[in-house]
Amino acid sequence: MRIGICTGGGDCPGLNAAIRAIVKSIKKRTNIELIGIINSFKGLQENPPQFVTLELNDVTDIYFKGGTILGTYNKSSLEEASYKSYLKLIKRGYELLKLDGILAIGGEGTQNIAKSLSEMGINIIGIPKTIDNDLPETDRTIGFATCVDLVSEAIIRLQSTAESHDRIMLLEVMGRDSGFIALHGGLAGGAHIILIPEIPVDYESVCERILARKKIGRNYTVIVVSEGVKIPKKPEDQTSSVSAVIAHELSKRLNMDTRVTVLGHLQRGGTPIPEDRILATKLGVFASLLVEKKDFGKFIAVDGSHFRTVDYKDLKRKVRRKISLDDFTITTAESIGICLGRKIPSGKMPR
């Protein structure tokens, strides 16, 4: 067989570890030829298609490197007619390279394209990757753990400067419409308030938490804000980040100095932590075993400590996983006194 490997969407730590695992697992047991597709599916659109052959020497010591040795491409949404043309070009490249299948490492956009290609008869296996951890069907995705580690470190650093200046420090993190990065990073870093898209922001509850801290001599507060938090915006606020709008509102209500830090693409870069390297390696090996069995048309999902497959035909399009309000992580955060932007049913505000 001749199998292509591609990494799609935004880059994240752990992609190279997955590529390495696929190549090592397959090359040590089979004579399957492996092709690295350059810049995701865009490499198959080119004429001629852009690719490199992958041998064991090509993946030596890449597991700790951030980014992806194959490059990536984040395709924006297209009109239906353009999307169909886009898929046809990918299929043409697939046929020109005489591929027998593709391993697509990517998030929601990549897996939506993979689903369409599977429906067109292309053999494909999907590996879950996104720092947002918002892919349906899977508990974990490559890149999430490293992102949470970075957010946690940023919160710890903001604590000292917030305390030194008696400030409210807001840290805005990625996540689109899901709050996994904010909730897990905030919990790990010891944030005092975490605002996520799944819970509407109640300014009164937020202010109450800040004032409760001041009453016991803690004149500073660190707030983690997920970029997808929904808040009312005035016309003059439309170009401001969500954290900047919240900071302005809190400053006005509490007469306290506020500062905003937006982590941005720092969350995507750098060396993957061991948890991501291990997850990526296990997913790469699992995918290689599916290739050997010619078990295509599947998306790999992490289910606790186990892996399972989901048929692409059963994978819903353009669906992002959100935090369930009965998630024990929410219970944990509120039980130790972290405000999630809503009133705590127990009544008494914990310290």
Image (cartoon, helix red, strand yellow):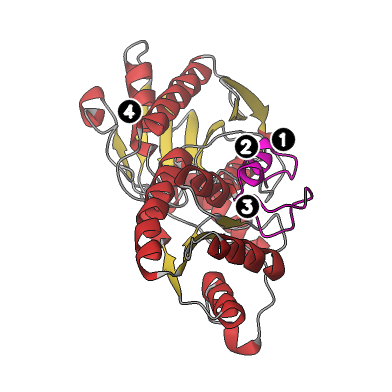
Q: Quadrant of residue 114?
A: top right
- The boundaries of the magenta stretch are 323-351
Q: In this figure, which residue is indicated by the disc labeled 2?
A: 118
Residue 240 placed where, x, y %?
53, 79
Q: Main SS type for the magenta part? A: loop
Label 1 near label 2: C-beta < 8 Å?
yes
Q: Earlier in the sequence, mark 4 or mark 1?
A: 4
Dot 3: element: loop
Query: Around disc 4, counting alpha carbons within 10 Å, would you say few (fewer than 14), some (14 to 19), or many (20 or more)?
Result: many
Which is more foreground, mark 4 or mark 2? 4
Report how far apart the C-alphas of labels 4 and 1 lie in the structure: 28 Å
Foreground disc of the pair 3, 2: 3
Task: Point out residue 159 in the picture as x, y percentages from the top left corner.
Answer: 40, 57
- Is there a contact, CB below 8 Å, between mark 3 and mark 2? no
Q: Is residue 279 above or below residue 203?
A: above
Q: Amino acid at mark 1?
A: Lys
Q: Residue at x 50, y 30 (%)?
A: 101
Question: Which disc is residue 178 wearing?
Answer: 3
Q: Secondary structure at mark 1?
A: helix
Q: Residues within 10 Å of mark 3 (few under 14, many from 20)?
A: many
Q: Which of label 3 and label 4 is nearer to you?
A: 3
Q: Nearer the viewer, mark 4 or mark 1?
A: 4
Please tell me which residue is depicted at 48% across the width and 33% down the height of the picture.
Answer: 102
In the rendered image, the vertical position of residue 334 relative to residue 20, given as above or below? below
What amino acid does circle 4 point to? Answer: Arg
Q: Which residue is mark 1?
A: 313
Q: Residue furthest bottom?
A: 236
User: Residue 20 has which mark?
Assistant: 4
Residue 275 versus residue 190: which sits nearer the camera? 190
Mark 3 or mark 1, earlier in chain: 3
